[in-house]
Amino acid sequence: MPDMFDLTGKTALVTGSSRGLGQSLAIALAGAGAQLILHGRDEAALASSADLVADADAGGRRPASVRFDVTNPEEVEHSIAALVDEHGVPDILVNNAGIQRRAPIAEFPVADWDAVIASNLSSVFYVSRFVAPGMIERGSGKIVNIASVQSMLARQTIAPYSASKGGVAQLTRGMAADLARHNIQVNTLSPGYFATEMNAALVDDPAFTAWVEQRTPAQRWGRPEELRGTLIYLASAASDFVSGQNIFVDGGMTSVV
Protein backbone atom coordinates (compact mmCIF):
# COMPACT_ATOMS: atom_id res chain seq x y z
CA MET A 1 0.00 0.00 0.00
CA PRO A 2 2.71 2.61 0.77
CA ASP A 3 4.02 2.18 -2.80
CA MET A 4 0.80 3.76 -4.08
CA PHE A 5 1.87 7.05 -2.46
CA ASP A 6 5.53 6.89 -3.48
CA LEU A 7 6.57 9.74 -5.79
CA THR A 8 10.13 8.56 -6.39
CA GLY A 9 11.20 9.38 -9.94
CA LYS A 10 8.48 12.01 -10.41
CA THR A 11 9.09 15.68 -11.14
CA ALA A 12 6.76 18.25 -9.59
CA LEU A 13 6.27 21.94 -10.38
CA VAL A 14 4.55 23.94 -7.63
CA THR A 15 3.66 27.54 -8.47
CA GLY A 16 3.86 30.09 -5.68
CA SER A 17 6.10 27.82 -3.62
CA SER A 18 8.53 30.36 -2.19
CA ARG A 19 6.43 30.75 0.98
CA GLY A 20 3.17 29.85 2.71
CA LEU A 21 1.03 26.91 1.67
CA GLY A 22 2.93 26.44 -1.57
CA GLN A 23 6.18 25.96 0.32
CA SER A 24 4.53 23.43 2.64
CA LEU A 25 3.10 21.54 -0.34
CA ALA A 26 6.51 21.43 -2.01
CA ILE A 27 8.05 20.03 1.18
CA ALA A 28 5.39 17.30 1.21
CA LEU A 29 6.11 16.26 -2.37
CA ALA A 30 9.86 16.19 -1.74
CA GLY A 31 9.33 14.06 1.34
CA ALA A 32 7.35 11.58 -0.76
CA GLY A 33 10.25 11.27 -3.23
CA ALA A 34 9.50 13.81 -5.96
CA GLN A 35 12.12 16.07 -7.52
CA LEU A 36 10.85 19.61 -7.02
CA ILE A 37 10.79 22.65 -9.25
CA LEU A 38 9.94 25.65 -7.11
CA HIS A 39 8.37 28.79 -8.52
CA GLY A 40 8.16 32.36 -7.32
CA ARG A 41 9.22 35.91 -8.11
CA ASP A 42 11.34 36.72 -5.05
CA GLU A 43 14.84 35.27 -5.48
CA ALA A 44 15.70 35.40 -1.76
CA ALA A 45 12.43 33.74 -0.76
CA LEU A 46 12.96 31.02 -3.36
CA ALA A 47 16.44 30.32 -2.03
CA SER A 48 15.12 30.05 1.52
CA SER A 49 12.32 27.74 0.39
CA ALA A 50 14.82 25.60 -1.53
CA ASP A 51 16.80 25.05 1.69
CA LEU A 52 13.70 23.75 3.48
CA VAL A 53 12.71 21.50 0.58
CA ALA A 54 16.24 20.07 0.35
CA ASP A 55 16.10 19.27 4.07
CA ALA A 56 12.84 17.38 3.52
CA ASP A 57 14.17 15.39 0.56
CA ALA A 58 15.30 11.94 1.67
CA GLY A 59 18.19 12.11 -0.80
CA GLY A 60 19.14 15.66 0.17
CA ARG A 61 18.54 16.88 -3.38
CA ARG A 62 18.25 20.60 -3.88
CA PRO A 63 15.19 21.61 -5.91
CA ALA A 64 15.35 23.59 -9.11
CA SER A 65 13.79 27.06 -9.13
CA VAL A 66 12.05 29.09 -11.83
CA ARG A 67 10.87 32.71 -11.85
CA PHE A 68 8.06 33.95 -14.08
CA ASP A 69 4.86 35.96 -13.91
CA VAL A 70 1.95 33.51 -13.90
CA THR A 71 -0.41 36.26 -15.08
CA ASN A 72 1.50 36.88 -18.34
CA PRO A 73 0.62 34.16 -20.88
CA GLU A 74 3.59 34.91 -23.17
CA GLU A 75 6.01 34.72 -20.25
CA VAL A 76 4.37 31.52 -18.98
CA GLU A 77 4.65 29.88 -22.41
CA HIS A 78 8.32 30.83 -22.80
CA SER A 79 9.22 29.79 -19.24
CA ILE A 80 7.43 26.44 -19.41
CA ALA A 81 9.16 25.66 -22.70
CA ALA A 82 12.55 26.42 -21.11
CA LEU A 83 11.64 24.39 -18.03
CA VAL A 84 10.65 21.37 -20.15
CA ASP A 85 13.88 21.60 -22.14
CA GLU A 86 15.92 21.50 -18.94
CA HIS A 87 13.91 19.23 -16.65
CA GLY A 88 11.42 17.41 -18.85
CA VAL A 89 7.64 17.61 -18.65
CA PRO A 90 6.53 17.70 -15.00
CA ASP A 91 4.72 14.58 -13.82
CA ILE A 92 2.91 16.68 -11.22
CA LEU A 93 1.70 20.27 -11.53
CA VAL A 94 0.36 22.10 -8.49
CA ASN A 95 -1.27 25.43 -9.37
CA ASN A 96 -0.98 27.25 -6.08
CA ALA A 97 -0.02 30.87 -6.88
CA GLY A 98 -2.63 33.41 -5.84
CA ILE A 99 -3.42 36.67 -4.06
CA GLN A 100 -6.15 38.19 -1.90
CA ARG A 101 -7.73 41.65 -1.96
CA ARG A 102 -10.47 42.83 0.41
CA ALA A 103 -13.14 45.50 0.06
CA PRO A 104 -16.96 45.67 -0.11
CA ILE A 105 -18.16 44.97 -3.64
CA ALA A 106 -19.50 48.53 -4.09
CA GLU A 107 -16.03 49.88 -3.30
CA PHE A 108 -13.86 47.18 -4.85
CA PRO A 109 -11.29 48.72 -7.24
CA VAL A 110 -11.56 47.43 -10.79
CA ALA A 111 -7.77 47.06 -10.92
CA ASP A 112 -7.90 44.78 -7.87
CA TRP A 113 -10.63 42.66 -9.49
CA ASP A 114 -8.43 42.23 -12.55
CA ALA A 115 -5.43 41.33 -10.39
CA VAL A 116 -7.34 38.72 -8.36
CA ILE A 117 -8.83 37.03 -11.43
CA ALA A 118 -5.49 37.07 -13.26
CA SER A 119 -3.50 35.68 -10.33
CA ASN A 120 -6.00 33.15 -9.00
CA LEU A 121 -7.85 31.92 -12.09
CA SER A 122 -6.20 32.91 -15.36
CA SER A 123 -2.83 31.72 -14.08
CA VAL A 124 -4.22 28.21 -13.56
CA PHE A 125 -5.35 28.17 -17.18
CA TYR A 126 -2.07 29.59 -18.51
CA VAL A 127 0.28 27.24 -16.67
CA SER A 128 -1.90 24.18 -17.28
CA ARG A 129 -2.36 25.12 -20.94
CA PHE A 130 1.38 24.99 -21.57
CA VAL A 131 2.18 21.97 -19.38
CA ALA A 132 -0.70 19.79 -20.59
CA PRO A 133 0.56 19.10 -24.15
CA GLY A 134 3.65 17.36 -22.81
CA MET A 135 1.57 15.34 -20.38
CA ILE A 136 -0.75 14.33 -23.22
CA GLU A 137 2.18 13.23 -25.36
CA ARG A 138 3.59 11.20 -22.48
CA GLY A 139 0.19 9.74 -21.58
CA SER A 140 0.21 10.59 -17.88
CA GLY A 141 0.10 13.44 -15.41
CA LYS A 142 -1.37 14.84 -12.21
CA ILE A 143 -2.66 18.41 -11.93
CA VAL A 144 -3.78 19.72 -8.54
CA ASN A 145 -5.38 23.16 -8.49
CA ILE A 146 -5.44 24.91 -5.12
CA ALA A 147 -8.75 26.67 -4.46
CA SER A 148 -10.43 27.42 -1.11
CA VAL A 149 -13.60 26.89 0.90
CA GLN A 150 -14.55 30.11 -0.90
CA SER A 151 -15.05 27.98 -4.01
CA MET A 152 -18.30 26.99 -2.29
CA LEU A 153 -18.89 29.63 0.38
CA ALA A 154 -18.86 33.42 0.44
CA ARG A 155 -18.01 36.05 3.01
CA GLN A 156 -18.18 39.83 3.14
CA THR A 157 -15.43 41.87 1.39
CA ILE A 158 -13.98 39.00 -0.69
CA ALA A 159 -16.52 38.49 -3.49
CA PRO A 160 -13.87 38.60 -6.28
CA TYR A 161 -11.72 36.07 -4.42
CA SER A 162 -14.74 33.77 -4.07
CA ALA A 163 -15.47 34.19 -7.79
CA SER A 164 -11.89 33.32 -8.68
CA LYS A 165 -11.81 30.20 -6.52
CA GLY A 166 -15.23 29.06 -7.73
CA GLY A 167 -13.83 29.48 -11.22
CA VAL A 168 -10.83 27.30 -10.32
CA ALA A 169 -13.13 24.50 -9.16
CA GLN A 170 -15.16 24.65 -12.36
CA LEU A 171 -12.06 24.97 -14.55
CA THR A 172 -10.79 21.82 -12.84
CA ARG A 173 -13.91 19.94 -13.90
CA GLY A 174 -13.54 21.11 -17.48
CA MET A 175 -9.86 20.17 -17.54
CA ALA A 176 -10.72 16.73 -16.16
CA ALA A 177 -13.28 16.25 -18.92
CA ASP A 178 -10.65 17.06 -21.56
CA LEU A 179 -7.66 15.26 -20.07
CA ALA A 180 -8.92 12.11 -18.35
CA ARG A 181 -8.74 10.08 -21.57
CA HIS A 182 -5.02 10.87 -21.70
CA ASN A 183 -4.47 9.37 -18.22
CA ILE A 184 -4.15 12.83 -16.69
CA GLN A 185 -6.05 13.38 -13.45
CA VAL A 186 -7.05 16.94 -12.51
CA ASN A 187 -8.45 17.75 -9.08
CA THR A 188 -9.00 20.70 -6.77
CA LEU A 189 -7.68 20.87 -3.21
CA SER A 190 -9.64 23.46 -1.23
CA PRO A 191 -8.20 24.54 2.13
CA GLY A 192 -10.29 26.08 4.87
CA TYR A 193 -8.84 28.75 7.13
CA PHE A 194 -5.12 28.10 7.52
CA ALA A 195 -2.62 30.12 9.50
CA THR A 196 -0.36 31.40 6.71
CA GLU A 197 1.46 34.61 5.81
CA MET A 198 -1.44 35.69 3.56
CA ASN A 199 -3.81 35.38 6.54
CA ALA A 200 -1.44 36.84 9.15
CA ALA A 201 -3.58 39.92 9.81
CA LEU A 202 -6.65 37.73 10.32
CA VAL A 203 -4.82 35.28 12.59
CA ASP A 204 -3.68 38.23 14.71
CA ASP A 205 -7.23 39.61 14.95
CA PRO A 206 -8.82 38.12 18.13
CA ALA A 207 -12.35 38.70 16.85
CA PHE A 208 -11.70 36.99 13.53
CA THR A 209 -9.91 34.08 15.16
CA ALA A 210 -12.88 33.66 17.49
CA TRP A 211 -15.14 33.57 14.43
CA VAL A 212 -12.96 30.91 12.76
CA GLU A 213 -13.00 28.79 15.91
CA GLN A 214 -16.78 29.11 16.25
CA ARG A 215 -17.48 28.51 12.55
CA THR A 216 -15.15 25.50 12.17
CA PRO A 217 -16.25 22.23 13.81
CA ALA A 218 -12.58 21.50 14.62
CA GLN A 219 -12.60 24.83 16.51
CA ARG A 220 -9.20 26.05 15.27
CA TRP A 221 -7.18 27.32 12.34
CA GLY A 222 -5.68 24.67 10.07
CA ARG A 223 -1.93 24.02 10.06
CA PRO A 224 -0.19 24.02 6.63
CA GLU A 225 1.21 20.53 7.16
CA GLU A 226 -2.36 19.22 7.41
CA LEU A 227 -2.77 19.66 3.66
CA ARG A 228 0.15 17.40 2.83
CA GLY A 229 -1.54 14.01 3.02
CA THR A 230 -4.35 15.04 0.70
CA LEU A 231 -1.88 16.48 -1.78
CA ILE A 232 0.22 13.30 -1.81
CA TYR A 233 -2.95 11.30 -2.43
CA LEU A 234 -3.92 13.51 -5.40
CA ALA A 235 -0.38 13.49 -6.81
CA SER A 236 0.18 9.74 -6.54
CA ALA A 237 -1.04 6.49 -8.07
CA ALA A 238 -3.52 6.20 -5.20
CA SER A 239 -5.84 8.61 -7.07
CA ASP A 240 -5.49 7.23 -10.60
CA PHE A 241 -9.29 6.96 -11.03
CA VAL A 242 -10.12 10.24 -9.30
CA SER A 243 -10.59 13.30 -11.48
CA GLY A 244 -12.62 16.50 -11.48
CA GLN A 245 -13.15 16.48 -7.72
CA ASN A 246 -13.01 19.34 -5.24
CA ILE A 247 -11.64 18.02 -1.95
CA PHE A 248 -12.11 20.27 1.08
CA VAL A 249 -9.56 20.20 3.91
CA ASP A 250 -11.35 22.57 6.23
CA GLY A 251 -11.93 21.07 9.67
CA GLY A 252 -15.55 20.43 8.69
CA MET A 253 -16.46 24.04 7.81
CA THR A 254 -18.27 23.28 4.55
CA SER A 255 -20.29 20.50 6.19
CA VAL A 256 -22.19 22.67 8.66
CA VAL A 257 -24.33 25.82 8.79
Image (spheres, rainbow, N blue to C red):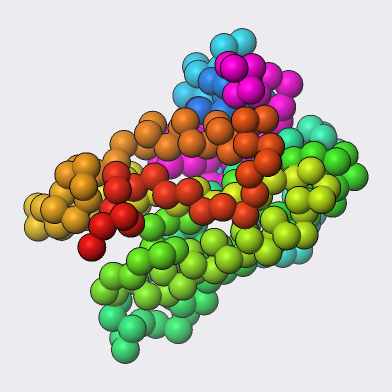
Residue 206 shows in the view: yes
| Quadrant housing the N terminus | top right
Taking depth in this image into account, of 40 and 56 the one nearest to the observer is: 56
Q: Which residues are magenta?
A: 1-27
The structure residue drawn at horizontal position 83% and vertical position 47%, both measured from the top left corner, is 182
Q: Nearer the viewer, residue 31 or 40?
A: 31
Which percent across, then down, holds residue 133? 84, 51
Q: Is residue 79 left or right of residue 234?
A: right
Q: Taking 252 as reference, is 8 above or below it? A: above
Q: Is residue 141 within the magenta segment?
A: no
When the figure is inspected, residue 100 is found, relative to residue 7, above or below; the finding is below
Q: Nearer the viewer, residue 180 or 90?
A: 180
Q: Residue at x 54, y 61 (%)?
A: 169
For image coordinates 9% across by 57% down, the residue present is 207
On the image, the x and y values in percent for residue 237 come to: 67, 30
Q: Tell me, yes or no, if residue 63 can be seen here.
A: no
Look at the image and tell me in which quarter the C terminus lies: bottom left
Could you tell me residue 108's position as x and y percent?
Answer: 36, 82
